Image (cartoon, helix red, strand yellow):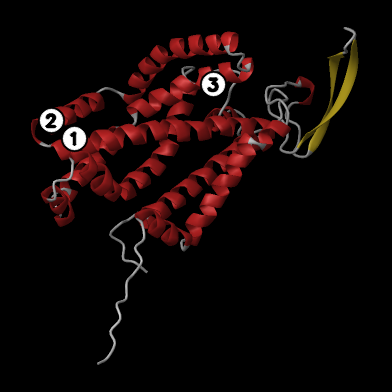
């Protein structure tokens, strides 16, 4: 009698399969590496480029690779002060106020990347949760929740952001003062976050509407599929069906949409900053730098080209990475 053997295939998770597919997408991998390098430049290397707000009017519009001498009064331990001369290297030149352009681009990148991370994360969580609950609940609950979305759609987005930002600004300022006073948080960093955080939260808290509609439509379709009906027949709880079986199947379109909203959120921030309602001095962002550079486009084009180049390359990388994540997170893709 011939021996028979049973061949079993080791199961893999959705995320492991997604990672294996993502690794094969060279463009997405390169884009991810580029974004990591950009984050390291903006959040680590930026602190070694000097003060982005230090002005030197005698050295404005300095050429790329130029250097300047800066004389400062340095206080000694005995209370006296001496003059100290520092040589500053301007790898990308200086702007109209004599401020180092590389330092301003990297520190401005912190704000632009943070608005992408924080605002998009807030919008992602709210949009996915709201849309999934609405689509799964159906009936009257779905109708009421979608009418609320339609109502918010009818109000200009920037108007809502301005109103919510003003509401949040007072609270974050008081919290920052309290943290500095009672918990000895760094004064400059804490108040800087209090200056930019309300705008990020306001954009994210109101930028979830389209994502909620996308998720709802996906859930309405998916809950009619056989796997969802089987889960319901087995008596699984609605929360388990929703978060273990339905929502993972909506992540592909959601992540792609989220990556495409990051540049939109950055542009919203730049628009509000141009109107004097967004990022306030001394903080800056890529959008603000591009707006400032446009004023000197004919005489000093590098003030526009350099921050625009950082901005454009980052957006390309986000779009390519989003496409790669969409393909990798598609649970209906065939196993290799």
Q: Nearer the viewer, residue 175 or 65?
A: 175
Labels 3 and 1: the sequence-earlier one: 1
Mark 2–mark 1 CB contact (< 8 Å): yes
In the image, is residue 41 above or below residue 98? below
**Where, by quadrant of the figure, is residue 327 drawn?**
bottom left
Quadrant in which the C terminus is drawn: bottom left
Labels 3 and 2: the sequence-earlier one: 2
Q: CA distance from mark 3 to mark 1?
A: 34 Å
Q: Is residue 298 left or right of residue 314?
A: right
Where is residue 127? Give x, y as percent: 30, 34
Label 1 sits on residue? 134
Labels 2 and 1: the sequence-earlier one: 1
Mark 3 element type: helix
Q: CA distance from mark 2 to mark 1?
A: 7 Å
Where is residue 223? Give x, y as percent: 16, 48
Where is residue 118? Give x, y as percent: 45, 31
**Which residue is painted at 44% across and 57% down in the image?**
19
Where is residue 295? Give x, y as percent: 58, 28
Mark 3–mark 2 CB contact (< 8 Å): no
Quadrant in which the N terminus is drawn: bottom left
């Amino acid at each position: 009698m011939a021996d028979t053997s049973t061949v079993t295939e080791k199961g893999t998770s959705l995320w492991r399969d997604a990672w294996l597919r993502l690794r094969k997408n060279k463009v997405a991998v390169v884009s991810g590496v580029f974004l990591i390098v950009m984050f390291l430049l903006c959040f680590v290397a930026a602190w070694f480029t000097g003060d982005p707000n230090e002005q030197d009017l005698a050295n404005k519009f300095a050429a790329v690779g130029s250097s300047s001498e800066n004389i400062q009064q340095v206080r000694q331990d005995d209370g006296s002060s001496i003059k100290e001369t520092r040589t500053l290297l301007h790898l990308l030149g200086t702007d109209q106020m004599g401020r180092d352009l590389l330092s301003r681009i990297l520190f401005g990148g912190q704000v632009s990347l943070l608005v992408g991370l924080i605002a998009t994360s807030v919008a992602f969580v709210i949009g996915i949760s709201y849309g999934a609950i609405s689509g799964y609940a159906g009936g009257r609950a779905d109708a009421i929740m979608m009418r609320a979305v339609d109502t918010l759609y009818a109000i200009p987005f920037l108007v809502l952001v301005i109103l919510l930002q003003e509401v949040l600004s007072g609270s974050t300022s008081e919290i920052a003062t309290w943290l500095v006073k009672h918990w000895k948080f760094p004064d400059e960093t804490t108040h800087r976050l209090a200056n930019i955080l309300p705008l990020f939260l306001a954009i994210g808290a109101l930028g979830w509407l389209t994502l909620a509609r996308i998720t709802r439509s996906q859930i309405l379709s998916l809950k009619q599929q056989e796997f969802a009906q089987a889960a319901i027949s087995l008596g699984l709880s609605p929360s388990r069906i929703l978060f273990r079986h339905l929502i993972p199947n909506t992540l592909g379109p959601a992540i792609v949409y989220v990556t495409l909203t990051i540049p939109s959120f950055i542009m919203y921030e730049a628009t509000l900053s141009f109107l004097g309602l967004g990022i306030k001095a001394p903080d800056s962002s890529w959008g603000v730098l591009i707006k400032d550079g446009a004023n000197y486009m004919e005489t000093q084009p590098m003030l526009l080209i350099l921050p625009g180049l950082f901005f454009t390359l980052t957006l390309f990388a986000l779009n390519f990475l989003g496409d790669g994540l969409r393909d990798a997170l598609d649970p209906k893709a065939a196993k290799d």
